Image (cartoon, rainbow, N blue to C red):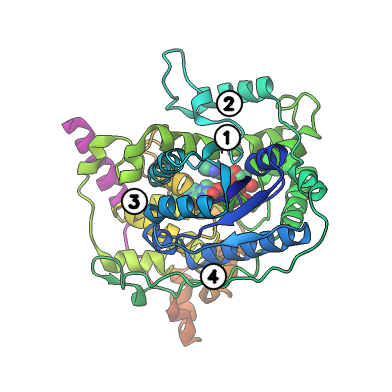
Amino acid sequence: MSALVWFRNDLRLLDNDAVLQACQNHQHVHFLVTPTLQQYVEHDWSLVKWDLYQRQMNQLGHDLADLGHTLHIHTLNKFADCSAFLTDFCSAQQVESIYFNREYPLDEVNRDQAVIAALQSNNVQVNTCDSNLLVAPEQIKNGKGEYYKVFTPFFKVWLQRIRENGVPAPYARNILQASSERSLAFEEVHLSLPEYPSELIPGLANSALTEPLQTSSEWPVGEATIRKLAQQFVREQSMEYKKQRDFPSIKGTSRLSAYFEIGAVSPRVAAHLLQRLSPEFPDGLPEGSHTWLSELAWREFYQHLMFHEPRLAKGQPFQVEQANFPWQTDVQKFAAWCNGRTGFPIVDAGMRELNNTGWMHNRVRMIVASFLVKDLHINWQWGERYFMRRLIDGSFSANNGGWQWSAGTGTDAAPYFRVFNPTSQGEKFDPSGRYIRKWLHELTDVPDKQVHTPHEWLRQASFLDESAHRYPPQIVDHKDAREHFIATFKQVKNAE
Ligand SMILES: Cc1cc2nc3c(=O)[nH]c(=O)nc-3n(C[C@H](O)[C@H](O)[C@H](O)COP(=O)(O)OP(=O)(O)OC[C@H]3O[C@@H](n4cnc5c(N)ncnc54)[C@H](O)[C@@H]3O)c2cc1C
């Protein structure tokens, strides 16, 4: 009899409890990935995220083969296909125990419940782990036994749990090495996602939008490489994180989000690296590193929230009354936002960074999200979807959390009356316009002083150079839009 490790969003061998426990408890272990392609399309996976996932999956296949193990890759359509496939697999391979790491959004929870029921009725023992989080959702409750809706008290208890639990040393790979004698060959798979529906939202064809990026080749894969990136960041940069993280022209953040999302690196590995900066970890860290740790906690806060509030996975705002907000459905303005042609330089630079690289700096994510919702009055769910279709780190929970935070509809969100002024945000966080000019070639020649409000300078320059006309005029009046948003939000809130 044997065991099975079922990989999903945990494409790694190191610090993977499913791998560790299966190898500790069984002589013979199978390894399996089941990409569910149609489901990924329904969940709006971007092509670039899928490409990264697939490259890391193939690398995992090579890593296992080097250790004498086979990674089985079996393509399925939907989550609903998993139960029948796993039941057949387990009976054909005489699997007595299966191990996997939990995922927390509703569809994933439902998939796993169906799998667990099917396998248990076939006498397969099911073992679930939580090694994609430092603290599992059930471990954080307030005095009334409820989950936390506000981040600060959540963070306090989260730190306390880390103090109590410690951070176990992540060395599953040694266990695998001990059980292997020879290298095997591994044949890579190269799969395409099925076609997306032709419209992103009703009335807006995909063809009206900037072509999505398909290749993730700028992002290295392989656990050892990714771990080095994490190590480099924590050792050399995390201390400066608090000072640098808000400036998009500086590489002041870790850029690990896509790797956390597919599980190519675990938060426990990150915690171990931080521990080297402070023996009293999670206490005693340099201020910047502590702030970075708090971002890992935000990641977990939103995953816990998804788990405890399944309605969030059904497209509902956390603040239910905001479902009645009279959103505008101007697809032209939405397309201008998506394509980085709103006439607001920091917004356009952010959207073009996203379209060109699959990633966007966090400060700029907040600015473009606020602009879509509070200036254009367009439903945050349109933005949420567009982000998922373009981001390499698209994460249902972090993205939903980020959008609801920005829209003021979330739990512990930015207050609705806090409306970012896109011009002064640009001036504050990209003072010399270095980031803006990197992405907006139309503004290459605009002097620093005018780069955040370039239209007058461009108008004058256009006498000399026709190309100065190419940057679009502003599509909205910020002051009016802000007032209208605040008044409407208040009205909806008070109507309850
Ligand atoms: C509208 C909006 C949408 C977002 N969508 C996503 C998304 O789809 N996927 C995603 O991973 N993050 C998302 N974020 C959060 C954040 O912008 C990214 O995690 C961050 O920019 C990734 O860059 P980094 O790896 O350099 O982060 P760092 O600053 O180095 O942070 C370290 C890690 O902490 C986590 N993290 C950081 N900030 C947040 C946050 N606010 N919420 C949750 N986790 C966080 C990420 O895993 C990140 O890799 C979104 C934020 C906003 C405002």
Answer with mark 3 or mark 2, whichever residue precedes in sequence.
2
| Quarter assignment of residue 215 | bottom right
Q: Earlier in the sequence, mark 2 or mark 4?
A: 2
**Circle 3 residue:** 380
Q: Secondary structure at mark 1?
A: helix
Separation of marks 4 and 3 at Cα, in angstroms: 22 Å
Disc 3 to disc 2, C-alpha distance: 29 Å
Left or right: 254 with respect to 347? right
**Residue 407 appears in the rendering:** yes
Region rendered in magenta: 475-496
Give the residue drawn at x 55%, y 60%: 359
Q: Identify residue for label 2.
A: 158
Does residue 416 show up?
Answer: no
Mark 2 in CB contact with mark 1 (< 8 angstroms)? yes
| Amino acid bearing label 1 | Ala
Neighbours of disc 2 within 10 Å: few (<14), some (14-19), many (20+): many
SS at badge 4:
helix
